[in-house]
Amino acid sequence: MERACIVIPCYNEAGRLKEEVFLAFLQEHADADFCFVNDGSSDKSGEMLQAMAQKMPERIWVVDYPDNQGKAEAVRRGFLYLAGLNRYGAIAFADADLATPLEEVWRLVGILRARRDVLLVMGSRIERMGIVIRRKLYRHFTGRIFAAVVSVLFRLNAYDTQCGAKVFVPEIIPEVFGQPFLSQWLFDIEILLRVRNRHADYDRVILEIPLEVWIEQGDSKIRFSHLLKMPGQLLKIFFKYRK
C-alpha cells in the first residue's frame, strides 16, 4: 500500500506536544509517517522534535526554519518538502494540538485512497447526535457566521473551510502549494480556490467528510489583532482569486 505522511506545523508547542501519541500511532500504522515543521519556535519544540525523530528516524521528518513565518507557510513548506521526496501517495496536514485526533485524520486518508476520483478530502466539524464535537459556544457561532460570509463572498459550497484536517493526492501539491498564501490564517480558503481555479469539476474532486471526533484544545493561537485583519485579508483573497 502507498505510504502517507501527515504534516504537523509547530510553533512553540513544547508544552502540549504529545510525543507518546505520535509514536504510538506510528507503531500501529506501518504505512504512516510524520513531517513536523518547526516554524521558528522560541521554546524547546525544536529539541523535542529532533529527539522524537531520533527514535524513529525512518518515519519522522523534521523541517526546521529559524524564523517564524506563520502556519500557512509552515504547512506549505512541509508539503513541498514531502513532494520533493516523491515517496507518498497521500499527504495530509493536522494541528499539533490534535484537536482532530490522528485516527480521524487517518480515516480521511483511507477515504482518499478509496476514491480515485477525488483530489482532496477535508474534514468538517458538524455537530450531530452520536458524534463528539466539543468547542466553546461562542466559537461555534462565530465560526458559522464566518462560514456564511465565505459562502456568499466566494460561492464555495463548503460547511467548514477552517477545519485543520485535509488530505491531498501528491499530483495537486504544486498547484496548491507552489506559491505563498496571502493569509497565514485563512489559507484554507485559498487552498479550495486554487483547486477550483484549476478544476472545473472542483465540487466533485473535493470531498468534505464530517468528523466523528473533534475536541478543542486550550487557547487558540489566533489573537484579537489577527481577527481585526481578517476582513481585509478576505477582500485580498476575493480580488486575487475571482474569475
Image (tube, helix red, strand yellow):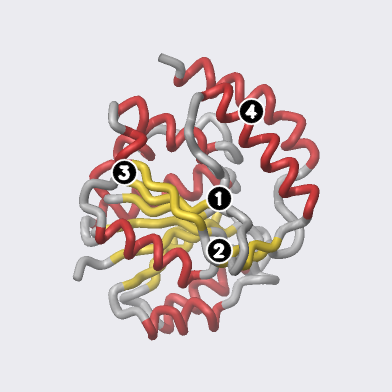
First reached walking from the N terminus: tag 2 or tag 3: 2
For badge 1, the amino acid type reads Cys
Q: Are marks 4 and 2 in contact (CB under 8 Å)?
A: no
Is residue 65 visible from the viewing direction of this image? no
Q: How many numbered discs sit on the rendered protein?
A: 4
Name the residue rendered at 62%, 64% in the picture: 129
Q: CA distance from mark 1 to mark 3?
A: 19 Å
Q: CA distance from mark 4 to mark 3?
A: 27 Å
The disc at residue 100 is 2
Q: Which mark is residue 163?
A: 1
Closer-to-camera residue (91/165): 165
Q: Are marks 2 and 1 in contact (CB under 8 Å)?
A: yes
Q: Earlier in the sequence, mark 4 or mark 3?
A: 4
First of labels 4, 2 by sequence position: 2
Labels 4 & 3 near each other (Cβ < 8 A): no
Q: Up-down: is 145 above or below 2?
A: above
Where residue 22 appears, as percent x and y from the top left, is 49, 76
Where's residue 58, x and y in %?
Answer: 31, 76
Using a 10 Å C-alpha cutoff, classify the residue at mark 2 as few (fewer than 14 neighbours), some (14 to 19) or many (20 or more): many
3D distance between C-alphas at marks 4 and 1? 16 Å
Tell me if label 1 and label 3 are in contact, CB under 8 Å: no
211 or 70, which lies in front?
Answer: 211
In the image: residue 66, left or right of residue 205: right
Query: Could you classify mark 3 by the number of other residues whose Cα lies within 10 Å: few (under 14), some (14-19), or many (20 or more)?
Result: some
